Amino acid sequence: MKTISQITGGLGNQMFQYACGKSVANRLGAKFFLDLSWFKIGNRIFMLDAFPNIRQSLKNNKHNSLWQPSIFQKILRRLKINAICYINEPHFSYWPGINNIKSSTHLSGYWQNENYFSDITPIIRQQFIFPDFSCLEAENIAQKIKSSSCSVSIHIRRGDYVEDTKTNQFHGICTTKYYEKALQTIIEKCDNTPELYIFSDDPDWIKNNFNTHGYSSVIVDIPEHKNAPYHDMHLMSLCQHHIIANSSFSWWGAWLSGGDGMVIAPRYWFADETMRHYNPSLTSWVTIE
């Protein structure tokens, strides 16, 4: 028996897809495979092998390996004669049907909900242990975060959320009003003075537009991390409190922190009105507009 996860998109999406498939495989006692065929035509790159434990698993071919359908399997699928059940995520909200899978399965979708892998939380945390930082600047910031009594990571996603019209209409961006309210919420709840660590794909915009209200702040803009965003996610995860964007990237940065700090998340994950009911935030997180 095998469980196959199709891996697509950026790092955050890849992590959700891996975690969901890993959970299904673990429940069934099945071999776990990764389908990377999307990257042959997509403009993103596969990044999960940056995590040492996943890289080692791929290398040893013990717990998960790469998968691609044989010509015979492709023919059978065209004829709708499949030894493998192909499941496309039916909607963005949690789908309980995932628990009814009993046979070899190919999973395609985003699977952005902790419930898909909450049964193996310790395993997922172990799989997503970060690699060592690649430069001294990152190590210095990490030490500063660790020594802070009230470190706050703030993720401001812009990039294609702003520049691509279709993406903007579907996802939208978190407003400055959201970040103002989120920061004020943390200030009111914390006894110590916050130190802000701001992460963004548009650091110049942050410098010119983001109001830190005079609090100590660091805009994390490390050139070596441009093609290695997991280092930024690592720094996020070291912070005590989190103000995330409507982005799977900062969702994981907050989730992997594993601490008892506050996580502020947007109430609406999508700008699209038909998607307003969907939000992958944990019940323990605070959601605001």
Image: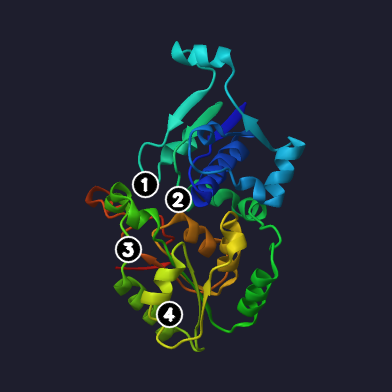
The quarter in which the C terminus is drawn is bottom left
Does residue 8 lie above or below 282 as drawn?
above
Mark toward the start of the polypeptide (3 vs 1):
1
State how far apart marks 3 and 1 are (Cα): 15 Å
State how far apart marks 4 and 1 are (Cα): 28 Å
- Tell me the residue that label 2 is attached to: 113
State how far apart marks 2 and 4 are (Cα): 24 Å
State how far apart marks 3 and 2 are (Cα): 15 Å
Does residue 134 lie above or below 239 as drawn?
above
Determine whether the residue tagged by mark 3 lies in a helix, strand or loop.
loop
Q: Amino acid at mark 4?
A: Ile
Determine whether the residue tagged by mark 2 lies in a helix, strand or loop.
loop
- Tell me the residue that label 4 is attached to: 186
- Tell me the residue that label 3 is attached to: 267
Q: Is residue 111 left or right of residue 274?
A: right
Quadrant in which residue 34 is drawn: top right
Mark toward the start of the polypeptide (2 vs 4):
2
Q: Is residue 102 visible?
A: no
Does residue 162 lie above or below 76 as drawn?
below
The mark tally for this picture is 4
- Tell me the residue that label 1 is attached to: 93
